[in-house]
Amino acid sequence: MAINSKLTFILASASPARRRLLNALGIHAAVMPSHFDESSLQIDNPAELVETLAECKAETVGRRLQERPGDGLLQRENTLILGCDSLLVVQGEIYGKPADEREAIARWERMSGDVGELHTGHALIDIKQEKILVRSRATRVYFAAVDTGEIAAYVATGEPLNCAGCFAIEGKGGAFVDKLEGCHTNVIGLSLPLLREMLRELGYQITDFWKNSGE
C-alpha cells in the first residue's frame, strides 16, 4: 500500500524525545497529547500495563478528533495515531516518572549498580482501515554504580524528573548506563524497529515516508 502524501501521522504524546525519534525516521508527526489519567489503571503486569496505557492514549486522541473534525488534523481516509507509554521495572517494582526530587534520589539509590527492564507500549490506530495494533517491547538496562554526589547532581539537573525510569539515556543519564540488551530506541520511549513492523502489518512501508518528505 503506498502512503498518500496527505497522510496525517499523529503522536498522542507530549514527549520531545519521541517526536525527535519520529523526525529522525522521516515521520513529521502532529503532536496531540492525550492527557489520559494513568492513575485510573491498576495493572500489575508491566507489559500489559504499558500496552493498555498506550492504547488508551491513542484511543483518547482518536475520540477527540472524531468530535472535532473541523480542526484540520483528522482526515479520515489518511490518519495514523500513535500512542506510547514507558515504565521501568527494577527488582519486580514498577516505576514511572518520579513525583519529585526526593523520590528521584531514592530511586537512583536503589537503581545504582542494578539491572532493570524498560518496557514501552505502542498502540497504532489506522483510521482508514479501522484497525488498531498494540505491541510492547522490553530492553534490559544495566545501571552503573554511582555515588551519592553524582545522584544528587544528576537529579538537580531536572532531567530524571521528566523520564520514565528516572533517566534519559540520550541525555546526561547516558553516563550512568553501562550497557543495554535489546532495542536502544525503546529506552528513549519508542522502538523504531517495532514501529516499522507495525506499519508493515498495516500495509505501509516506512521508506514511503522518506519519498513523500523529500528525504
Image (spheres, rainbow, N blue to C red):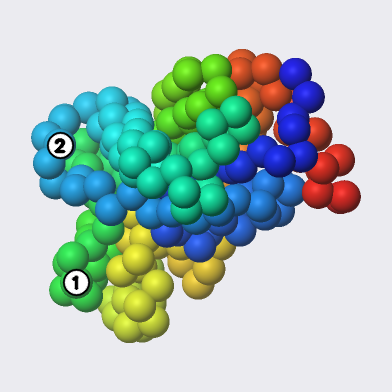
Q: Choose top left, top right, bottom left or bottom right for residue 192.
A: top right
Relative side of 8 to 98, left or right? right
Task: Check disc 2: other Cα within 10 Å, few if <14, some if 14-19, many if 20+.
Answer: few
Where in the figure is residue 183, as x and y percent of width and height?
Answer: 57, 38
Residue pictured at 49% horizontal, 38% vertical: 82
User: 183 or 23, which is in the foreground?
Assistant: 23
Where in the figure is residue 65, as x and y percent of width and height?
Answer: 40, 42
Instruction: Relative to 50, say whether 13 is above or below.
Output: below
Instruction: Relative to 187, say whether 153 is above or below.
Output: below
- Dot 2 falls on a residue whose secondary structure is loop
Where in the figure is residue 160, as x and y percent of width and height?
Answer: 35, 68
Relative side of 18 to 40, left or right? right
Q: How many marks?
A: 2
- Is residue 190 something one can see in this rendering? no
Q: Choose top left, top right, bottom left or bottom right for residue 202.
A: top right
User: 202 or 52, which is in the foreground?
Assistant: 202
Residue lying farthest to the front in this orientation: 70
Residue type at tag 1: Asp
Where in the figure is residue 147, as x and y percent of width and height?
Answer: 33, 73
Q: Choose top left, top right, bottom left or bottom right for residue 6.
A: top right
The quadrant the N terminus occupies is top right
Instruction: Relative to 133, say whether 25 is above or below.
Output: below
Residue placed under numbered mark 2 in the picture: 41
- Dot 1 falls on a residue whose secondary structure is loop
Residue pictured at 70% horizontal, 24% vertical: 204
Nearer to us of marks 2 and 1 is 2
Residue type at tag 2: Leu
Residue pictured at 38% horizontal, 54% vertical: 33
Cα separation, mark 2 vs mark 1, equals 21 Å
Instruction: Relative to 108, say whether 72 is above or below.
Output: above
Residue placed under numbered mark 1 in the picture: 100
Residue pictured at 35% horizontal, 66% vertical: 162
